């Protein structure tokens, strides 16, 4: 084996563990939306965490739970749900009135995305014609 081939192979062997460490697994994030307060939802939250734990998910280790509490202020739910949908999260967990608001925010986001895409296409066609 030539010296260059050996050194090149050695460099690759050293770089591989560094690259493997750089690719840390992404921890999934669950967005939790509730119309209630954290205090009012303590029992439900404990049951939710227990069910996740039984499924192999532990908050802070294998999953991150991001809570959004409306504290009984229902007018805040639509804005909170829209914010979660804008983040394009994989999972939104909601209960009570928050379910309907989260669903509506998701549908609006889908509709506006299609609308924006149509506007972009129309703008491109208009620019091509001028």
Image (cartoon, grey):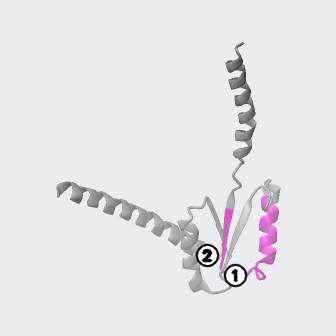
Q: Quadrant of residue 9?
A: top right
Q: Residue at x 71, y 30 (%)?
A: 11
Q: Residue at x 70, y 68 (%)?
A: 66
Circle 2 residues within 10 Å: few <14, some 14–19, many ≥20: many
Q: Along the horizontal axis of the image, is 45 left or right of 83?
A: right
Q: Along the horizontal axis of the image, is 124 left or right of 6?
A: left
Residue 38 among magenta residues = yes
Above or below: residue 121 compared with residue 23 = below
Q: Residue at x 71, y 35 (%)?
A: 15
- The residue beneath circle 1 is 36
Residue 47 among magenta residues = yes
**Which residue is the extreme one toward the top?**
1
Q: Secondary structure at mark 1?
A: loop
Q: Secondary structure at mark 2?
A: helix
Q: Quadrant of residue 72?
A: bottom right
Q: Quadrant of the C terminus?
A: bottom left
Q: Position of residue 65 (x, y in %)?
A: 72, 65
**Highlighted magenta segment, given as a residue range:** 30-52
Q: Quadrant of the N terminus?
A: top right
Looking at the picture, tell me which residue is in the foreground, 22 or 1: 1
Q: Position of residue 125 (x, y in %)?
A: 24, 56
Looking at the picture, tell me which residue is in the foreground, 80 or 100: 80
Q: Which label's residue is closer to the chain start, 2 or 1? A: 1
- The residue beneath circle 2 is 98
Q: Position of residue 37 (x, y in %)?
A: 72, 82
Circle 1 residues within 10 Å: few <14, some 14–19, many ≥20: some
Q: Residue at x 68, y 20 (%)?
A: 4
Q: Are marks 2 and 1 in contact (CB under 8 Å)?
A: no
**Which residue is the extreme one toward the left?**
130
Q: Position of residue 20 (x, y in %)?
A: 72, 40
Calculate the distance from the C-alpha at mark 2 to the C-alpha at mark 1.
9 Å
Looking at the picture, tell me which residue is in the foreground, 124 or 9: 9
């Amino acid at each position: 084996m030539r010296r260059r081939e050996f050194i090149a192979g050695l460099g690759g062997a050293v770089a591989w563990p560094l690259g493997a460490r750089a690719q840390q697994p992404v921890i999934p994030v669950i967005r939790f939306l509730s119309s209630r307060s954290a205090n009012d939802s303590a029992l439900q939250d404990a049951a939710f965490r227990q069910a996740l734990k039984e499924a192999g998910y532990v908050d802070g280790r294998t999953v991150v739970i991001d809570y959004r509490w409306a504290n009984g202020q229902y007018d805040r739910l639509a804005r909170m749900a829209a914010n979660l949908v804008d983040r394009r999260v994989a999972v939104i967990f909601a209960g009570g009135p928050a379910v309907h608001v989260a669903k509506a925010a998701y549908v609006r986001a889908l509709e506006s995305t299609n609308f924006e895409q149509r506007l972009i296409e129309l703008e491109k066609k208009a620019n091509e014609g001028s």
